[in-house]
Amino acid sequence: MPTESHASTSAIRVALPVPLFRLYSYDCDSLPAIGARVRVPFGNRQLIGICMGPDTDPDPAIKRKPVSAVLDEANCWTEPLWRLLVWAADYYQHPPGEVLQHALPALLRQGDAAGYQTTVHYEVTEQGRTVELDSLKRAPQQQRLLAALRRQSLLRRDIVSEDYSLSALKALQDKDLVAAVEHQPDLQQWQFSIDAEPLTLNPEQAMAVAAIGAAKQPQTYLIDGVTGSGKTEVYLQAMADVLRRGRQVLVLVPEIGLTPQTLRRFKKRFNVPIVMLHSALTDRERLDAWLDAKQGHAAIVIGTRSAIFTPCQRLGMIIVDEEHDNSLKQQEGFRYHARDLAVLRGHEEQVPVLLGSATPSLESLNNAMQKRYAWLRLTKRAGNAKKAQHVILDIKSLPLKAGLSQPLIKLIQAELEQQNQVLLFLNRRGYAPALLCHECGWLATCERCDAPYTLHQHNRLLQCHHCGSQQRVQTQCHDCGSTQLVGRGVGTEQLESTLAELFPEYPVLRIDRDTTRRKGSLQQHLEDARDSKYPLLVGTQMLAKGHHFPNVTLVALLDVDGALFSADFRAAERLGQLFTQVAGRSGRASKPGTVVLQTHHPDHELIQDLVNNGYHHFAASALTERELTQLPPYGQMALFRADDIQADTAMAALQTIARHFPQRDDVTVLGPLPAIMEKRAGRYRYQLIVQCHQRALRTQLLRHVLPQLEQLPELRRVRWSLDVDPQDFT
């Protein structure tokens, strides 16, 4: 990185956090390092930008302003990560200033120094060491936290990361059982050691670990293992050699809900510093964790998708768990895919990348088939677990009670009598998806969206799950004045209350976004489920991802028929993944498991394929169809979105964009078309799809077209965006 001073003022190029692709030229007394932050005047504001290097051809007609301050002596990122960020801005065709800002912690975006501050850690007092833990049994969160603090002192970020309650921490301080002590960061080099012995691997797991360890050149591995096959144990044993050599491991998980259990598993195995990066941390805690990773003080870095931009001094391995999960794709602003960037970063850093899933994305499966990835298959469940039995229940003409058919109720009763757990999956929260008038048919519909309100019975609210608007439940019909307003359809809240009526002696635990809003509630619910405190579990997709419930022997999917007829070409793939992942929660220990699928379409070819042949047979058929239609991964897509309070304005904007693309055989332009939900939050939404045979051609076209679009005045009147490799068409 160039850092030498110049006797005369130098012109430098600066990337600013503005939605424009251009770089800005400023004067600076000395040339900052490429990738260093600078504070510069922009209009009547001061912005934090990133130096992109000298401006070798400044425009003499433009009067340049001087840089206000140079904030860093060196690049904020490592050299390989810097190259990845520059590449990502070009590939996803997003303004480089916004890309680079996205890759920085909030405090650095605001201009704070890239250094540690004195913080506090929490440790037990003398009274806290002698008090009986049973005296806190009526305050289980305090009891749990005090027990943890007796083992070791914790920073606030550790308390947050492990899902302990901050209100419990305050209560313990008020009781003089815990004290806050000034803490200076321990910047000593960590030493590798193992706290718990590795588990015994089966032959397939052993071969996977050996293949990763014996590779002469770093590459990407697809660890394709059925649910319960022990993929995490493969990660742990593959990581051990990396950590033993003093290298760092970056682990990506799709959502915060999975981070505490991942953290616990890693802490139980390795006695090394572990940091977590996710949205529940304060800005200071996030910066400290980022610095720990960058300076090499953290051995393992665990985070959600944005953690892919964390610099690591001695990166040795990248792991992406549940690589198929759509949460790894950023859906707003800089629309990157963390899995794809992980593969590119592994190539730049020359380290192995492990992609793990029981239901790999079609893109990853195709890369494995084309031998771009090493394909490691785990076809057997770990330990004594056996493959679950599948049952299709045809519910045509059957009476349903809150979505439950009589045959399913009998199956649930039988499992409960055997003291087993039952998990019921329904991907609709609330009491009922709609409220209508029994006399005239009026439907309570959100005025801002093309969707009905969802009825939430417990707080008597109608809520729109798309724009967030809500109102009190009405007592009379809006059209005819009738008081006969009834809920239609079934949500998790209604299912929970119905199960409580049918099986009053068995407690029910509901896990969805409504019941897990409070800090630590999700983790507590998952622990209660694992400990079999609740025989009946009800949940949405939150329960489908990587959780281990050893006593669950029956899993039922109540309603997936809507996905069979979706307009989204990815709907079949997502249903296949969802069915397989939910089914994988059953029979994970020594007890045999059963999976029940209720459907009005038992003969549908997708259902028959999934139940009789499994996900991989379905995926092979889906890939053949995609190849015939040149859909991803065989064709390359870019999606333009536009929305406005006037439908015609949004449509006209996309028609203008469409005219800038050439008419040729290897380029297809579809649209403008209404989004699957045309009106959302009061705005009309339209889409334009550009499909190319080759990725390079798509990139070339977008590079040519986007600068022209920036100059069009009609596009400044609407809100529009570009999504390269789109995953969501709703």
Image (tube, rainbow, N blue to C red):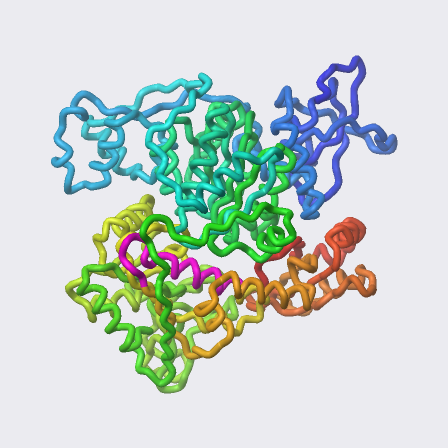
Instruction: Using residue 9 as the reference point, say whether residue 304 is left or right of it.
Output: left
Please identify the quadrant where the N terminus is shown: top right
Q: Determine which quarter of the picture holds residue 57.
A: top right
Q: Determine which quarter of the picture holds residue 349.
A: top right
Q: Is residue 290 visible?
A: yes
Q: Position of residue 574 (x, y in %)?
A: 51, 62
Q: Where is residue 109 in the image (x, y as percent from the top left)?
A: 57, 33
Residue at horizontal 34 percent and vertical 50 percent from the top: 548
Residue at horizontal 19 percent and vertical 62 percent from the top: 418
Q: Determine which quarter of the picture holds residue 535.
A: bottom left
Quick one: which residue is furthest to the front in this view?
203
Viewer-closest of 199 and 406: 199
Residue at horizontal 31 percent and vertical 78 percent from the top: 400
Q: Position of residue 478 (x, y in %)?
A: 40, 78
Q: Position of residue 413 (x, y in %)?
A: 21, 69
Instruction: Using residue 132 as the reference point, say whether residue 204 is left or right of it.
Output: right
Viewer-closest of 463 and 276: 276
Please give the range of residues in magenta. Answer: 573-593
Instruction: Using residue 141 as the reference point, say whether residue 12 is left or right of it.
Output: right
Quick one: which residue is furthest to the right in this view?
60
Does the magenta portion include 591?
Answer: yes
* 491 in relation to 314, above or below: below
Please identify the quadrant where the C terminus is shown: bottom right
Does the magenta portion include 637?
Answer: no
Viewer-closest of 328 and 688: 328
Viewer-closest of 50 and 578: 578
Give the number of callouts: 0
* 419 in relation to 607, above or below: above
Q: Can residue 483 be seen in this view?
A: no
